[in-house]
Amino acid sequence: MTGKRKTIAIIGCGPKGLYALDSLSQVGRNNPASQIDLHIFEASPHPGAGPIYDPSQPDILLMNFPARMIDAWTDGRGPDFLKWSHSNGSSVAADDYVPRSNVGAYLGWCFKKVVENAPANINLTLHTTSVTSLRQKQDGWIVTPSGIVVDEVLVSTGHQDWLRENSADSAITVSSPYPISKTLTPASVRAGAIVACRGFALTFIDMMLALTEGRGGVFTEIDKGHSYQPSGQEPALIAPFSRSGRPMRAKVSQTQFTPPRDVEFWTEQLDGFQMVLGDPRVDLFSEHIWTKLLSIADKLQGASGGAAREFFDDWTATPFDAHRCRDALRLGYDIASGRIAPDIGWALAETWRRCYPQLIRWISYRELCQHDAALFLEVAAEMERLAFGPPAQNVGKLICLEEAGLISFDHLTNPPNADVIIDATIPSAGAAALSEPLAGLLRDGHVSVGALGGLRINADGQSLCNNGVTAGLSIIGRATEGCVLGNDTLSRLLHDLPERWAKQVLRSTAAQNTGLEAAT
Ligand SMILES: Cc1cc2nc3c(=O)[nH]c(=O)nc-3n(C[C@H](O)[C@H](O)[C@H](O)COP(=O)(O)OP(=O)(O)OC[C@H]3O[C@@H](n4cnc5c(N)ncnc54)[C@H](O)[C@@H]3O)c2cc1C
């Protein structure tokens, strides 16, 4: 039998597009009768890596999880990042937080491998271009600017156009610090300038390092943290500000931190959590799930019931001033580097991290009621700060720069008069900040937005609109955040959407071919 050739497009080939391509190659290999023309559209010159893992960015920009967790393959079909690095002569250790540029080189290599090893029944074309629109045509989609018509399209555009152009008042505003080598030059942020920085999360840390270490300053590790030798090229002052003024907590350093509980403790707690999630009467995050998470945190800490809730309520009660921010950073850093015993805040963050995969499975594709959705969004945003912060070494550097007077916490919720304002926020995940082609798909009613703000998809990645599945259109990644929890990550373990999408596409190809056979 020779079936009809199917034409498929993947729009956006950062990590998630790479995983989808790899998954499609896998199922294509197992289904040699399927004939596929695959078009990959990627705006950046680094397919597989994309702008976030651009291999040419400065080495001071680090991953926020350790090297041992980086693996672009499933089932050991290729080398993980550590094996790949070692085979290239690097001595990187499992617990190192490596430069994103190194990870970009790895992802680029993985992309090449997948393309080289693609089965003969998949005919692959890479278009290095930005897709500006997708329009439905009968039972296919027209991809602009190429004009190619495809049967199936997967949109995995991730952060979309996050490298924002500088706005008209660019003399004082840097609209995005990325790419750092182009935006944070001595001409745009001169030595001695007063810099206000909107946003106090991971992008702020990148920006802080670019304007200090990236300009020739030198950090040295000392007993209580770091010392800093300036180069003279730094701004006079960097002042972060945000709505809450709350900082991120340092991630623990595996080599310095000793976990207080053993594997048995966690097996028991995770089993107990699963019982709650599996109970068909459990449908409220606020009443059932959040309460359970707080109680696990209390147990982890050996604290009296209510300690974790008290911590959370206090943490979120008011915006932070300089004093609180300083104390919170120091406390998190001292815990992370094993100088002091963990506190209840650490216990809550650890509980969230450990329970996260189960929570993802429970909440993804679920429609919460408005009240429950609001609490979940508040908790998730706060836990992002507490559980998924920067590596301890970067918090150590932040503390050191503040003590040296180069960073000021005096304007945390109120920006100072500044020579330059840097926008170090990232456009919201979910559907709040869509650009093309997703914005057009929303206007045309081919995609819809769920209660938690993400584009709605089913477990195979297919777009859901008001009439059910939108034929031939799938979306994975950041735009669906809310419908799918925590999918803006490099991890290939937390979600199986690329694999499920590929199987679904092949199923529909097979069904089409069977129909064709029956008709002829
Ligand atoms: C500064 C920063 C640091 C991060 N650090 C980490 C980390 O340490 N660990 C971690 O797990 N996660 C990190 N993340 C989260 C990160 O988003 C994910 O790790 C990962 O990049 C998600 O992959 P993705 O393919 O979904 O999205 P992206 O990486 O954003 O890739 C999307 C791709 O689509 C392309 N594209 C976009 N629009 C179009 C279009 N219209 N036409 C054609 N192509 C298009 C882009 O060029 C890009 O290559 C970080 C994010 C940022 C912003």
Image: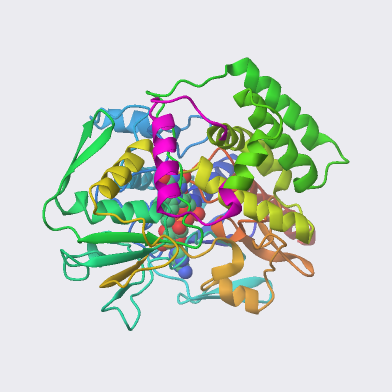
Instruction: Tell whether 189 sits left or right of 464.
Output: left
Q: Position of residue 251 (x, y in %)?
A: 44, 36
Q: Give residue 455's quadrant in the image.
A: bottom right
Q: Give residue 277's quadrant in the image.
A: top right
Judge whether 306 appears above or below 450 on screen. Answer: above
In the depicted view, which residue is nearer to us: 376 or 137? 376
Judge whether 45 appears above or below 70 on screen. Answer: below
> Seen from this angle, which residue lies furthest front?
323
Viewport quadrant of the C terminus: bottom right
Magenta span contains residue 321: yes
Instruction: Please report the bounds of the magenta region as a residue range.
Output: 315-344
The main secondary structure of the magenta stretch is helix
Q: Position of residue 490 (x, y in %)?
A: 47, 45
Instruction: Tell whether 389 sits left or right of 453.
Output: left
Q: Is residue 435 visible?
A: yes
Looking at the image, how many numbered discs can be counted on the residues?
0
Q: Position of residue 88 (x, y in %)?
A: 25, 32
> Seen from this angle, which residue lies furthest left?
232
Q: Position of residue 325 (x, y in %)?
A: 43, 49
